[in-house]
Image: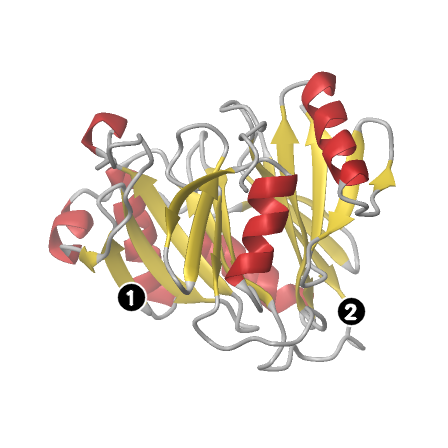
Amino acid sequence: MTADPIIPKTARIGRTSLVVADLDAMVDFYRGVVGLSVRRRTKTEATLGTSETPLLVLTEDETAASRHREQAGLFHNAFEVPSRAALGAALDRIREHWELDGASDHYVSEALYLTDPEDNGVEIYTDRPREEWPRASGGTVQIGTVSLDLADIAAQSNGKTTVPSGTTVGHVHLEASSIRTAREFYAETLGLRVQTEARSALFLAAGDYHHHLGVNTWNGRSQPAGGRGLAWFEFVVPDDETLATVRRRLEDADIAATDRGDSLEVTDPDEISIRIRTV
């Protein structure tokens, strides 16, 4: 039985963090291709984002093993830009400095896909107006995939070399070992709303967004997460009351969490680390 969603619509994804082997190369990619700005840099760590908001933390660990093909983990981090003009500029940067893996119109959004220097998936997308999103009779959002008109996107470009204010980590998409156990954890325990579900994919959200979290089993990942790649990602909830409710849900499910007062850290069934904090 599915519990009622308890994560409010004002919740969102915060930062996401990667363990990397070559910090310089990864900073160059996320700055020059994705268009993020470096907010803080040390010898072994960099935080990138917009001029106002940190979005991505890169931590260098030359001893970390590569992620094995059987291991769960990141499918992609998805950076949402606020306009088609910004998406067109991202396409310009990808074409000039990198390689585009694919592009899709998902009915709710228009998206570009690429892969960073250490094989982490990256999506850059912009949402369509909410009133255009297709919905099922129960109100859930229906996500699809058709080809994207790249010529039209390119024509919208504003030519900027950095992402604008208002860019966020719109969603995180994971590769899991089981849709059933992912649903039990993220929907029935954490309290996200299931928006779209298929045998091998699941899309969940806070409130009526199309998805803050995607989960798939397309590549047959059967082992726990590990090695380089995703270290953790954040859900940001609006208040202490919501955090307390999540805390109780975890306790009721006998799921251990590290409690830091204004935040919780918990691992999902595939040992992927999630940080849940207040604004």
Residue at mark 1: 102
- Is residue 24 depicted above or below 84 in this figure? below
Rounded to the nearest angstrom, the CA distance separating label 1 from label 2 is 30 Å
Q: Residue at x 47, y 76 (%)?
A: 219
Let me know if residue 55 appears in the view: no
Q: Nearer the viewer, residue 244 or 96?
A: 244
Where is residue 171 drawn, in percent x and y?
48, 45
Q: What sort of colour scheme is used for the picture?
A: secondary structure
Where does residue 27 sit, x and y in percent of width and height? 60, 59
Query: Which secondary structure lies at badge 2?
Result: loop
Quadrant location of the N terminus in the rendered image: top right
Mark 1: which secondary structure? strand
Residue 61's disc number: 2
- Give the amino acid type for the residue marked by disc 2 in the picture: Asp
For residue 74, side relative to residue 231 (left or right): left
Disc 1 marks a residue whose amino acid type is Gly
Q: Nearer the viewer, residue 162 or 187?
A: 187
Residue count near mark 2 (Cα–Cα under 10 Å), binned few <14, some 14–19, many ≥20: some
Q: Position of residue 69 (x, y in %)?
A: 58, 82
Q: Nearer the viewer, residue 168 or 2?
A: 2
Disc nearer the start of the sequence (1/2): 2
Mark 1 nearby-residue class (10 Å; few <14, some 14–19, many ≥20): few
Q: Identify the image quadrant of residue 165.
A: top left
The quadrant of the image that shows the C terminus is top right
| Place of residue 276 in the rendered image (x, y in percent of width and height, measured from the top left) | 70, 36
- Residue 225 in sight in this render: yes
